[in-house]
Amino acid sequence: MEWNREILQKPLWKEEIKNREAKEQIAQRIAGRVQDGDVIGFGSGSTSYLTAIEIAKKVQSENLHIIAIPT
């Protein structure tokens, strides 16, 4: 799968994300637990958005295969 590199480098959200640093830390922790073959459920909030970006980076860099299920 080809990832849109621009989205990974410059993520867009509809408004300013409050507590962004804390949410990015959570996103990185969650992404660190992702393994090949995982099925992951995603919410619709800004923390889920940031987590999806971190997981996408890991999937790309480690050539993982996951299934993502959005709300």
Image: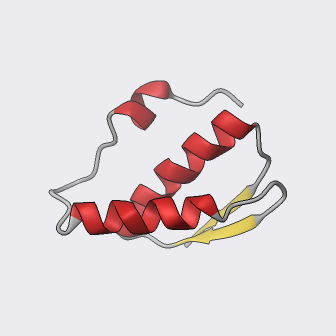
Number of numbered callouts drawn: 0
Q: Is residue 15 left or right of residue 29?
A: left
In the rendered structure, the answer to whether residue 27 lies left or right of residue 65 reads left
Q: Is residue 46 left or right of residue 66?
A: left
**The N terminus is located in which quarter?**
top right
> Is 3 located above or below residue 44 in the figure?
above
Would residue 46 be seen by someone viewing this image from the given angle? no
**Above or below: residue 54 compared with residue 33:** above
Quarter location, residue 27: bottom left
| Residue 38 rendering spot, x and y as whole percentages | 78, 63
Q: Is residue 34 above or below residue 63?
A: below
- Write the residue at 65% across / 26% down: 2
Horizontal and vertical percent for residue 46? 33, 65
**Frontmost residue, 60 versus 29:** 29
At horizontal 51% and vertical 66% (from top left) the residue drawn is 29
Residue at 42% across, 59% down: 49
x then y, percent, for residue 20: 24, 62
* In this view, 7 is above or below 34: above
35, 47: nearer the viewer = 35
Structure colour scheme: secondary structure
State the residue at coordinates (62%, 45%): 58
Q: In the rendered image, is residue 12 in sight? A: yes
The quarter holding residue 66 reads bottom right
What is the quadrant of residue 21 in the picture? bottom left
Quarter that holds the C terminus: bottom right
